[in-house]
Amino acid sequence: MNEPDPTRQSRLIYMDHSATTPTHPDVVAAMLPYFTERFGNPSSLYTLAGISRKAVAEARGRVARALGASPSEVFFTAGGTESDNWAIKGVALANRHRGTHIITTAIEHHAVLHTCRYLETQGFSVTYLPVDRYGIVDPDTVREAVTDETVLISVMTANNEVGTIQPIEEIGRIAQDAEVYFHTDAVQAIGFVPIDVDAMRIDLLSLSAHKFSGPKGIGALYIRDGVNIDTFIHGGAQESARRAGTENLPGIVGLGAAIERATSDIAAHSRRIADMRDRLLAGILADIPATYVNGHPVLRLPGNVNVSFAGIDGEALLMLLDAEGICCSTGSACTSGSELPSHVLMACGVDPALARASIRFSLGEMTTAEDIDTVLSVLPETVRRLRALSPVKI
Amino acid sequence: MYNDIVMDHFQHPRNGGEITDADAVVEVGSPECGDTTKIYLTIRDNRIEDVKFQTLGCAAAIASSSMATEMIKGKTLEEAWKLTNRQVSDALGGLPEKKLHCSVLAEGAIREAINQYRKNMGLEPWTE
């Protein structure tokens, strides 16, 4: 049986750009020759392979330029999760002789949190810093958490659920003063938050192409020259013998093309999306009573709307919106029956009943003014239906 | 994620709402996931003449309440008491494994409502 193809629905409204984005046709076009004619293994010696090597070098240069880094500091990985794993485990293990303490936050992506939990089983201690009700990490708490044993501070640039943007530059300065390596998971931030690894004093940075109209399965880890880090994937001599495995050539080319597009005019792109986001949020707050905004009012990603509608379940709302062709997400899916609501919302001190009532719309390149109109015409009635069915009176 | 029967009952729930002069009204919650279901029963001659529900929960929880109330409508209290969450999920054509617990709430709420009615009538509550 053929699965229905929701993208063929003329009225598909995609508001889940924080989950993933479609690969832009220009990016696909740049990638295509590297599947077919220019397929040579960059490690081989003939001319065909040289074409591949050149493409990898060009893509590395594009990623470096987007970060204010030098190409020799950019290492391709399979995506954000691998980059986070490599950065944290690699630095922790390589610097074990200096200390076994890591500082991170309670709202990191699971790729960071679960990696830290694993390291706790291997003799490391981890401080999970709290955030305020808006999801902001207080830099003073970072400074106070540093001990003689601290080898790494890992704080995400922008949060995936509530979109809060952290004071990265301040935290970078604290890390530099304390002579502790600073890693940031910038997976959600690329294309929205201008990155300059020197100005922000970032030692390691994770990014993933599919969050900014690039392909899935390709990412990068920026490693500042001189950072002491272990190899994570052992094998051949690819990536200066620091990340083995035959290069994902089309993916690397796609990442290069996508990051150049995404960072060419961050201000204009962000403004266009933020204008639509502001209109969506204003409309929601005007038309739906007992709505609570999660995250920071200003210091947030331009495409992020995270709200809780008292008295309903976020997943039920998501399913009803899906039936209307609207794609969004909830951090609070009740799956096992014992699963807690979103760790991010809980860390922000959101009431558990409101945490489960949360829904995230993440706007992006695909979003149009008509999409906002449609969501604003559908959402109030959908919430009203669920509230009418709910025993909880608001 | 859900089959067509579940989606139908979720999107078009049967018996959703309130009964103002119900013979029994109970609200039960799941301490595990925070789902809450309220059941209203109108009982005549030992039969469930009318039933309504309100549920705060995911699609599986709402569909389970809808199906469970359909299954006990017009039944005797003895028949309604015997309804199990397995029968409800079977009638729904099956629920995803991780969502099975969502159907427990309807069964529990119906039994509590029946016992509330029995207590109101001065009868011993049923235990099994």
Image (cartoon, coloured by chain):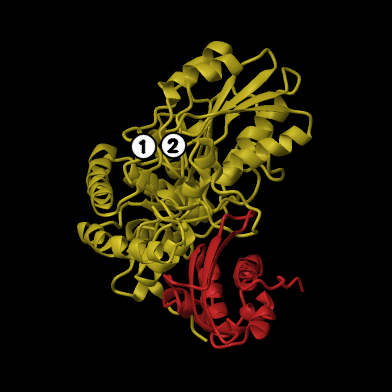
Chain colours: A yellow, B red
- Name the front one of labels 1 and 2: 1
Q: Chain ID for label 1?
A: A
The amino acid on which the numbered mark 1 sits, given as a three-letter code, is: Arg
Q: Position of residue A41 (x, y in %)?
A: 57, 54
- The circle on residue A267 is none
Q: Nearer the viewer, residue B90 or A64?
A: B90
Residue A90 is drawn in which quadrant?
Answer: top right
Q: In the image, is A236 to the left or to the right of A18?
A: right
Q: In the image, is A100 to the left or to the right of B43?
A: right
A79 lies above or below A371: above
Question: Between disc 1 and disc 2, whose residue precedes?
Answer: 2
- The circle on residue A158 is 2
A5 lies above or below A269: below
- The circle on residue A300 is 1
Q: In the image, is A242 to the left or to the right of A46?
A: right
Pointers 1 and 2 in contact (CB under 8 A)?
yes
Query: Residue sitting at 32 percent across and 51 percent down?
Result: A364
The amino acid on which the numbered mark 2 sits, given as a three-letter code, is: Ala
Q: Position of residue A56 (x, y in %)?
A: 48, 46
Mark 2 element type: loop
